[in-house]
Amino acid sequence: MADDSIIDKASTMQHLEEPLLGGVERAYTTGDYADAIVTCKGKTWKVHRLVLCSHSEFFRKAWGGEFKEAKERAIELPDDEPRTVEAMLSYLYKRDYDAQSGGSGEEDIASIVLDARVFIIADKYFILKLKDLAAIKLQERAKAEWKSPAFANAISEVYTASPAEDRTLHDIVIETVKEHAVELFQDEEAHASFHAVVDNVGDFAADLLKALGREHSKTAKEKKKATTYKCPYCATKFSLDRPPPYSGSNFSCPCCRNYINTPLWWSDYGVLDE
């Protein structure tokens, strides 16, 4: 049973934190008591150095030394995009960001693509918890959006802009594609955006090939004892003298003659010898 004193302390802390966090959020929305600005491609945010510096080493160094930014209390981020900067600042004040936000006239960015960009900007400005949050959001969206053009665009974003030394997003998209590889590769027309990424992003294609190769190798080892097959059409079981190699001549069910296909295809219908 939980200690009542611990519960009371947690409740008290939450009670004390809520108005403080609410005040920080309001300060971001209103710009009240702001003591610095952040600009990006024509858009300006009034910010509070205490908030930004407490989360990011980049801002601490920029505003804590003798740099121009410290004297003018202004930082320009010319290499980033306003939507991504806005998401980053939102997190610093609210501990979350809304991937659906974006006012009129702003670039229309799919939520899953914005998640990738937020991960990248969080890495760039040393905001580790924001990186974790962006990765979680992207992973959850990928589960639902794996067949969408937006997911294909996110793959491209990950492989062209995310840090090479951090494989978090790379692993998420590869695992997602691997799980749905059959559907994605069966109908090229329906998944044209995905196939375009495979054709044009070489590092992604290489990683995917390795992942699928490992998966097939694992499947082969698991089914190497299966010398009996069950036809998915007529349910007839038939045996071969030995497990077929994973290349070579096609064969079909000896009873109904359906499904003339490769040994690799038939391996999915292997059953262990009794």
Image: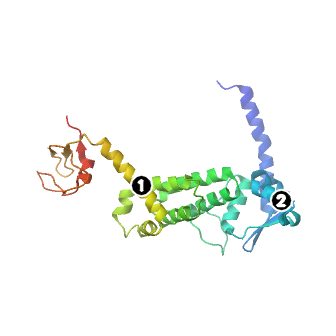
Left or right? Give the position of 123 relative to 245: right
The 10 Å Cα crowd at callout 2, few under 14, some 14 to 19, many 20 or more, is many
| Cα separation between marks 1 and 2 | 45 Å
Residue 240 percent coordinates (x, y)? 15, 45
Q: Nearer the viewer, residue 37 or 208?
A: 208
Residue of label 1: 210
Q: Residue at x 71, y 58 (%)?
A: 125
Image quadrant where residue 51 sits = bottom right
Q: Residue at x 77, y 40 (%)?
A: 15
How many numbered circles does the render carry? 2
Give the mark nearest the N terminus, 1 or 2: 2
Q: Quadrant of the N terminus?
A: top right
Residue 26 seen in the current view: no
Q: Residue at x 85, y 56 (%)?
A: 64
Q: How is the image coloured?
A: rainbow
User: Which three-letter amino acid code belongs to the residue tagged 2?
Assistant: Trp
Residue 141 seen in the current view: yes
Left or right? Give the position of 4 relative to 247: right
Residue of label 2: 63
